[in-house]
Amino acid sequence: SRLGISVVDRGGGMSSWLAWDERMFILLNQKWTSPFLDVVMPFLTDFDHWRIPVIVVLLLALAKGKTEARIAILFAILAVALADQISSSGIKPLFERLRPFHVVEDTRKLVGAHNYSFPSSHAANTFAAATFLALRFARLRWLLILATLVAYSRVYVGVHYPFDVIGGAALGAAIGATFAAVERTSRIRMEKWLSFGKKKKRVTDAAADDGSEASGTPNADPDSDTEDTKDTKDAENAAKRAAAKSKAGGAKRDSSDPKPKD
């Protein structure tokens, strides 16, 4: 039967995992509560409360970050988009599990929710981003804690069962890890390609230098060639002027010498 029915079978039986799921939901939503968490969890679970800060951070990273950081952010965005589509448009219509506030009595519903319950798209999205970024940048591993708190908040506010967030977290983590592997493979291949290009250029330049030395012609810079040519022309002109002066001086001496008598 579909998961949209009550966890209690009308014939008197009860699936063990659905029974555990409901018991844990009651504990997290109705028993293990506090006025402080009643304020914090709805704030944490609603993306509208921290969407703007996240967008600002992403824009700053894209504008001022290094190329590798920009590429990583794009990969993270793609991972979240894929996780959201698979969970919301693919799996939820397949299972059609009702939200717990439709099934469990005395559910404390602290925020609104629509669509079906399994899996949690919030958990899938946050774990997709957190897993990818944690694998890509070790200093961002704390994001996994944030993703766990978001997943927990979905149960606390009464819109998901524990298995909903566990399934969403597993889906998101798998997608994030896959994107991290793809990004790493692409980065390594790009680095090898760039390294090969630089090495090939060095080999080509070395071969050109060897050819120049073999022919006796130095492989000089074009600018230095121009300067050498200019210096050579200046030297030639100076030599011509010196020769002309010497010739003129010799002619003057010839004209000043007395002619010999017969």
Image (cartoon, rainbow, N blue to C red):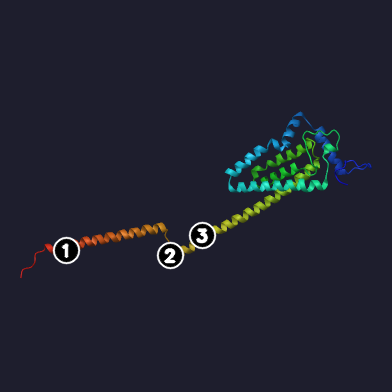
Counting residues from the start of the chain, the first of labels 3 and 1 encountered is 3
Q: Which mark is residue 202?
A: 3
Kind of residue indicated by mark 1: Ala
Where 246 sits versus 36, above or below? Answer: below
* Residue 70 visible, this angle: yes
Dot 3, how many residues are within 10 Å of its Cα: few (below 14), some (14-19), or many (20+)?
A: few
**Horizontal arrangement in the rendering, residue 208 relative to residue 118 (left or right):** left
- The answer to whether the residues at label 3 and label 2 have Cβ atoms under 8 Å apart is no
Q: CA distance from mark 3 to mark 2?
A: 17 Å
Kind of residue indicated by mark 2: Glu
Determine the secondary structure under disc 3.
helix
Residue 108 drawn at (x, y percent): 81, 33
Dot 2, how many residues are within 10 Å of its Cα: few (below 14), some (14-19), or many (20+)?
A: few
* Residue 135 visible, this angle: no
Give the residue drawn at x 42%, y 58%.
Answer: 222
The mark closer to the camera, 2 or 1, is: 1
Kind of residue indicated by mark 3: Arg
Determine the secondary structure under disc 1.
helix
Quarter in which the C terminus is drawn: bottom left
Give the residue drawn at x 62%, y 54%.
Answer: 188
Q: CA distance from mark 3 to mark 1?
A: 61 Å
Task: Locate residue 223: give its quadrant.
Answer: bottom left
Circle count: 3
Residue 176 drawn at (x, y percent): 70, 48
Q: CA distance from mark 2 to mark 1?
A: 47 Å
Determine the secondary structure under disc 2.
helix
Q: Is residue 224 or residue 81 the one in the foreground?
A: 81
Dot 1, how many residues are within 10 Å of its Cα: few (below 14), some (14-19), or many (20+)?
A: few
Q: Is residue 214 or residue 87 the one in the foreground?
A: 87
Q: Which mark is residue 251?
A: 1
Give the labeled residue for mark 2.
Answer: 213
